[in-house]
Structures are given as structure tokens and as C-alpha cells.
Amino acid sequence: MTKVYHDTGHFNFFAALLLCCLFFCSCENSEKEIQELSTKRIAVEEAKSIESYLSQGGKMRARLTAPIMNRYQTDSPYIEFPKSLHVDFFNDSLVVESQLNAKYGRYRETEQKVFLRDSVTVFNSRKDTLRSEELWWDQNQQKFYTDKPVEIHQPDKIIFGKGLEADQSFNWWIIKQVTGELLVPRGGFGGPPPVDSTQRRDTLIAQ
């Protein structure tokens, strides 16, 4: 007669060991897949000396230049300009009517919006200059906006405020909350003190 032994203790041990091996293998594969997925999601395409053109309504409206551009391949792709950017805005005759400068920019491709920060300036041919630390450029609506403090520098005054809307050509602008205004002297701020020519003449004669 053949005897069959059932050693349930050893069976349970080896079964558990096998399950552990399968579990660790599964975890190893999952980690590898996660790393590959993470690497893919944070993949960066870098380009240097960028010159890009923007068309709206079949007409060229802007030219963007930047020393470095990084494109991030995420679920919501975006483009980053970490070393400053400059934009020229054109009218229908392709004449530059306004310009933009910022030390940093991030373009959200799906929303077609550009977030600008750090020493943001926009100026037009009438010598109006917008200064702000943060500004949004909405390409669909062709306008700028912000809820941060702003300054509008004009030849005869400086207007301080909080919150602003303006067209991307900077032909018009609206400050939501004006907080102050400073008149600019005809000769501007600073510089050497005025010289009285008659006193200078008397001084020269005395010498």
C-alpha cells in the first residue's frame, strides 16, 4: 500500500514563499513601469536661440525671441522660457506697435495663455510703459491681465494701481484700482541740479 503524507506546514511555507516572490517581482515590474512613465512625463525638449511667430486671423501679430526654451511632455504640456523672453507685436502693416519683456515665461499650450513674471514690462510707441511682477497674456482674447500691483509710466506722470486689463498691442489699458499718481517733472527725476546762468557769469567775472 502506498502511503501519502500531507505535510501542511511545509506546503504553507513554500506557498507563502512563492507568493512573496511573485509579489516582489510584481512590485519590481510596477516600479520600473512607474519610473518609465515618470521619465516620460517629465521629458524635456530644449532649444536655444528661439525665434517664433504668432499668427491671428491669418495675419502675423507677434514675434517671440528667447535664449532658451524648454518643452515639458506632461499630461498638460507646457513651454518654459527660464532665461527671459522678448515679444514684438505688429499692426496690420507689420509695424511694431508694442513690445514685451520678462525674465520668465510659461506657455500653457492647451489654454494658449502665457504666464509672465519677474520685471515684466510692456511699452508702446506713445511711450506708455506697463511694469508689473506678474502678468498673463491670453492669446485667444489678445489681451493682458493681472490682479497684481502695476505701474503705468507716461511722459508726464506715473500711475500706480492694482489689477489691469489691456490689449496685447497696448493701445488701451484699464487699471481696476488706482492707488496713486505721481507727476513727473519736465526734466524727469534725478540728474544734476539746475544752473543759474547769471550767477555762473558773475562767478566767472569775479575770477
Image (cartoon, helix red, strand yellow):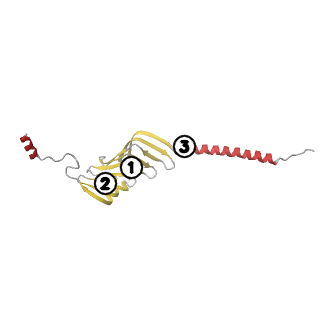
The N terminus: image quadrant = top right
> Which element carries disc 1, helix, strand or loop?
strand
Amino acid type at mark 1 = Arg
The residue nearer to you, when weighing 88 against 16, is 16
The image quarter containing residue 183 is bottom left
Give the residue at x 83% y 47%. Answer: 7
Describe residue 178's horizontal placement relative to residue 46 as left or right.
Answer: left
Residue 81 lies, in percent from the top left, at 41, 44
> Which is more foreground, mark 1 or mark 3?
1
- The kind of residue on which mark 2 rests is Glu
Marks 3/2: CA–CA distance: 42 Å
Q: Which residue is mark 3?
A: 39
Say few, some or many: other residues with alpha carbon within 10 Å of mark 1 (under 14 / 14 to 19 / 20 or more): some
* Mark 2 Cα shell of 10 Å, populated few (<14), some (14-19), many (≥20): many
Q: Earlier in the sequence, mark 3 or mark 2?
A: 3
Measured in 3D between alpha carbons, the distance from the residue under mark 1 to the one under mark 3, in whole angstroms, is: 28 Å
Q: Amino acid at mark 3?
A: Thr
Secondary structure type for disc 2: strand
Residue 43 relative to residue 150: left or right: right
The residue to which callout 1 is attached is 117
Percent of width and height locating residue 93: 29, 48
Q: How far across and how far down the image is residue 88, in percent? A: 33, 46
The mark that comes first in sequence, 1 or 3, is: 3
Question: In x, y percent, where is residue 181?
Answer: 27, 57
Task: Describe the element under mark 3 as helix, strand or loop.
Answer: helix
Q: Earlier in the sequence, mark 1 or mark 2?
A: 1
Residue 151: mark: 2
Instruction: Say which of 188 and 67 sits in front.
Output: 188
